[in-house]
Amino acid sequence: MKKILSKELRWALSFLRPYTWGLFGIFILTFGQNYAFALLPRVSTNFLFELISPERIHLIYRYLGMAVGIVVLKALLEFVNNFSKEIIINSTIKKIRDKYFTHLIALDIDFFTQNQTGNLIAIGINDVEEVKIWFYQQLIVFISGVMMLIIILVKLFIINWQLTLISLGVMPLLYWIIRIIGGKIRYVGRKLRKNLAGLSVNLHETLTGIEVVKASAAEEYENDKFQENTERYKKSHIKLSKLQNLLGPLDEMIIYLFAMGLLGIGSYFIIGGTWDIKGLTEYLMLLGIMSAPLIRIPNFIVKFKLVTASVERINYVLSTKPGIKEVENPLSRKVEGTIEFYKVWFSYNSSDDVLQDISLRVEKGEIIALVGPSGAGKTTIANLIPRFYDSSRGTILIDDINIREYNLKSLRSQIGIVSQSVILFNTTILENIKYAKREATEEEVIWAAKKAYAYDFIMELPNQFETNIGEKGVKLSGGQKQRIAIARTILMNPQILILDEATSALDSESERYIQLAINNLMEGRTSITIAHRLSTISHATKIFVIDKGRIIEVGTHEELLETCDLYKKIYNLQYFR
């Protein structure tokens, strides 16, 4: 069994441990079902040969009754067996999917920037389904087939042990064929799963970026790219089908040719007077029953080899460990909001430093702004505060305590983030606002909506707070989506606020409402604004100018216009624009 089941499949098998007793019951039912079926040749031969004599014609009802009883018993056992099997298999698949999702959302942001979303979706849906169909379901059928083989082999030994020993000579040849072709199928299977994941990624990216596709008139380009992916998938599938369809007929041909040889040898025993026709007939009937599982078992083994590609992909995610780890007994406490960076360095890879020797301090309730060209490191500084990433060197403190000492959930629940890229879910406005505070009352939600200047437009919608906003909030305007996101942050009531130019790319009326909402949001909170437009940071008490990962100047707007050439350059470009 260890040769048949690779380490990947033994991993999949480990999920069946909680259902050991249920599986034991299934195997007992399977044994009973197979044994009942294996009795039919004996009943059938007795029926045929004993009824040849007219004086024994009265036995017809007895043998017919036995045959019907066996068939009914087999059908009953099969129903109970299959129903129990489905309960166990679907429960196991639920555990794998739950484990996959729980592990996936616990991974760092960095993991998701390095892995395509479509691929991760394909693993959680398609690959897990492959494990269900081609391993769990087939495994029980495979074991049932092995049981049937053992039962029939024992009966064949009892009937004629010499002929049965000869019949075992076909096994090494079948094993050799399975080993050669099975190895190739495993390789092609990996390629097939990779091509299928490419299809999923292609489809996901095209649909999520459909506005850009339409605006760029790139339908033909996307269509050609998708057809290239489907062509690769088709070729892999055809190659796999060729190998699979070669294995079955090849095994079947060997088994049937060998059966003909056994028939000849059995006839020789009869001619020699060491056997009778009744024994040969029962033997051949049992051999016919045995041929079905014997032909199917190689295909099962091939499927096991094929599904290892899916298990490898699932294990790739499950074996990835989060880089952001908590210390033993982390702190869960209400933060006041003082933030300090002390000689902080950071790189996304080992070669390039995105941040270099960053030192800054933000007092409780202070409003500061980070200004600089694109790629200067502003967003990276903001992402280090909720520990989406950890610094390479240096220390980040909140309330003079190293942020690595904090419980991650406690820390992040007290940091609100509002960015220009609003993330809303395909559910109601109520559920979106309550997302960060599930226990919030209706009065609290209404209060947050009013503070975010969202209440009036919500009440004009057909279903008001129960209005479903569609995927990514597609049923709302850009300004409405921003106000829902701000209401969510207000309800969350964070002590620290990170704003990533939430008013950019909006019309003047929406921008005015959102600026008012942001002013409400910043009241009494430590606020860090990543500024793309200098006109939005007039309220900042301190502005840090960032360039190439370093703080090159600190001051107020007026001071920086006098002392910082880069700040003055950014201001003049925006002013004259």
Image (cartoon, rainbow, N blue to C red):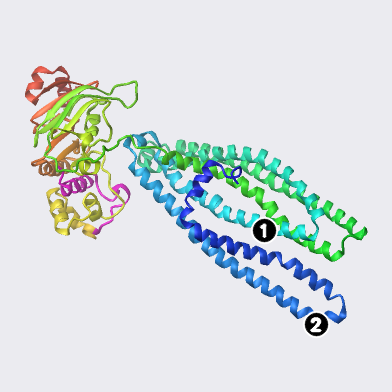
* Quarter of the rendering occupied by the C terminus: top left
Is residue 483 on the magenta stretch? yes
Is residue 380 on the magenta stretch? no
Count of numbered badges drawn on the protein = 2
Numbered tag placed on residue 58 in the rendering: 2
What's the residue at 79%, 71% (across, down)? 46
Does residue 507 lie above or below 272 as drawn? above
Mark 1 neighbour class, 10 Å CA radius: few under 14, some 14 to 19, many 20 or more: many
Identify the amino acid type marked 2. Answer: His
Identify the amino acid type marked 1. Answer: Met
The residue segment tinted magenta is 466-494
**Left or right of 286, for residue 338:** left
Q: Position of residue 361 (x, y in %)?
A: 12, 28
Numbered tag placed on residue 313 in the rendering: none
**Which quadrant of the figure has residue 519?**
top left
Q: Position of residue 252 (x, y in %)?
A: 73, 50
Would you say residue 43 is visible in this rendering?
yes
**Which quadrant of the figure has residue 37?**
bottom right
Q: Position of residue 267 (x, y in %)?
A: 88, 57
Element marked by disc 1: helix
Does residue 374 lie above or below 202 as drawn? above
Element marked by disc 2: helix
Residue of label 1: 148
**Left or right of 326, for residue 397:** left
